[in-house]
Image (cartoon, rainbow, N blue to C red):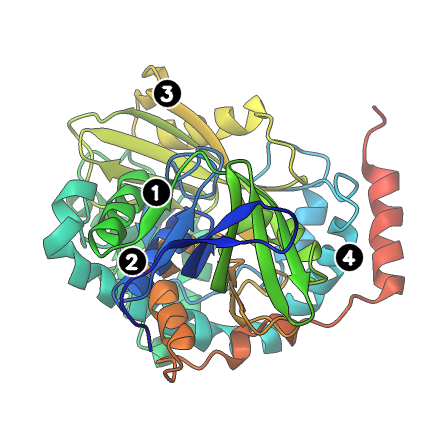
Amino acid sequence: MYHDRKVALVSCLEGESVAEHSDILIVGGGVIGACCAGELAATGAAVTLLERDEPPAVDSGVYANAGLITPSDAYPLAAPGVLGKGMKWLLDNGSPFYVAPLADKDLPGWLAQFAQNCRTEPMRRAMPVQRALLRASADLFAELAPEIGAACGYEQKGWLWVFETLEGFKTSVDEIPESAPLGVVSEVIDAARLPEFAPGLAGGFAGGRFQAEDGHVNPMLFVREMARLAQERGALLRTRTEVLRLEASGDRITRVVTSRGDFTADTVVLAAGAWSAALGHQVGLRLPIQPAKGYSVTVKRPAATPDFPLYLGERHVCITPLGDLLRFAGTLELAGFDNSIRWKRIDRIRAGGERAFAGTAALEPVEVWRGLRPCTPDGLPIIGRSPRHANLVIAAGHCMLGLGEGPITGRLVAQLVSDQTPQIDLAPLRVDRFTGPSQFAVRGIERVAALRTPKA
C-alpha cells in the first residue's frame, strides 16, 4: 500500500506557509496513540505522532493509573445499578463514583444515554465485545513482553478481588456464571485461605475471587516503551506539539494546526483520549466522550505485600505492586475538565490501602496523581472511520480500559487503515452507534442535579 517512507513539506492552500506531510498523522501520544503508531509504522507507512507533552501526558488517563491488564473484566462501565449509585453519591465528592451533572453542558445528555445503557440487555451485548478486546490485547502484551516487558515491569500474575462483607463476597461469586461462558475463569478464595494466598493482607476479609489470566504493568513506562518502539520502526514523534485545531473541506481532514506548525496527512487518526470530543466537534463530528477523573497515590512498597494486584470490592480501590513501588488507585469523577484534586477522594483511597495493608497510610507519597479517562455512554471504545470524513479514523473513548485495550486498538487501526479485515468486528464500536439522548431524560437529570447540588 505504501511506497518508500516519506515525510515532506508541502505547500498549503493559503499563502506561502508549508505543512509537514505524512502518510498517517496520529493526534495524541497516550497509550492508544503510541500503540497505533507502533502498529502503523510496522506496515511501512510514514507515521507522525503528535503529543502536547512527553508520552504520556501527566493529566491523561494512563500516566499513573492502576496499571491493570484485565482480560477477565468483561463487565462494561455501563451496568445495572451503576447510575443509581452515582445519583445516591451525588452530594459526596469523596465517594467512589461522584457525578457533578452541572459541571459540563454536555454531561446531562451523556448521563441520559448512559442510563439507557445501564440495563441488563445492553450490558450483555457489550460484554462479549469488551472481553474480545481485552483478551486479544492481553495476548499482544505477552507478544511484546520479550522486547519491552522488563523495561516497563510487565507481569502476568493474576488479580485478586477481596471483600469486607459477606454480601459483597456473595455478589461477586454470583457474577461468575455471567462471564464464564465468555471464557473467564475465576477461583473463589474463602476467608480461611486469604492469609496464605495474599501474604501481608490484613485480616477480617470475608473472601475473594482470583483471576489468574490478568496482569499488570507500569503504565507510564509502557507508553514510553511503545513510543520508543514506534520510533525504532520509523515513526516520527513530535513532542511538545499541542493540536489546536482540525480543519476539514468536503469529506476530508485537510490540515491539523498545532502549536508548532501545521501538518497534513493522507490519513488522520484521532486518539486524543478525553480531548477527542472537542477536536472532533471542530469538524462537525459528535463524539459522546466525557472526561472521568481518576486518582492514585504511589508509595514505597512495604516488604509484606503480594506480587499481584488487588481490588477492594466495596471501596473500589485497586492496589498494584510496581517494582519497589505500591500504587493505590481508584474512583470515578464525572465533573467535566475540572482537574483540581478533591483531597477527600485521596484520603478515602489511602484509607482503603490502610485497610488492606496496615501502616501504608503513614507512608510518605512518592506521587499523588489525577488524570482524565475518556468515557462513552455504553462503556465501549469508539474505533472506526468517521462517518463524515474519508480520511479520519477515531480510536478513543476506552473508559478505564485504555491501557488494557491499547495494543489491540493499535492493531485494529492498522488493519483498518491498510484495508485489511479487522480481526475483531468493529460494528459494535462504530462512531455512529449512539443515538441522541431523550430531551425529557436530559431535563429530568438537570432538575435533579439543580435540586441536589449545593449552592456555591
Q: Which residue is mark 1?
A: 205
Spatial CA span between label 2 and label 4: 35 Å
Residue 186 percent across, percent down from the top left: 29, 66
Q: Which residue is mark 2?
A: 38
Q: Are marks 3 and 2 in contact (CB under 8 Å)?
A: no
Residue 25 percent across, percent down from the top left: 45, 57
Q: Earlier in the sequence, mark 3 or mark 4?
A: 4
Spatial CA span between label 4 and label 1: 39 Å
The answer to whether one can see residue 50 in this image is yes
Spatial CA span between label 3 and label 1: 19 Å
Where 455 falls versus 334 (above or below)?
above
Q: Earlier in the sequence, mark 3 or mark 2?
A: 2
Could you tell me which quadrant the C terminus lies in?
top right
Q: Please state which amino acid type lies under the numbered disc 2.
A: Gly
Q: Please state which amino acid type lies under the numbered disc 1.
A: Phe
- Mark 2 burial class by Cα count in 10 Å: few <14, some 14-19, many 20+: many
Q: Nearer the viewer, residue 198 or 311?
A: 311
Q: Which residue is mark 3?
A: 361
> Circle 3 — which element?
helix
For this view, does 190 lie left or right of residue 296?
A: left
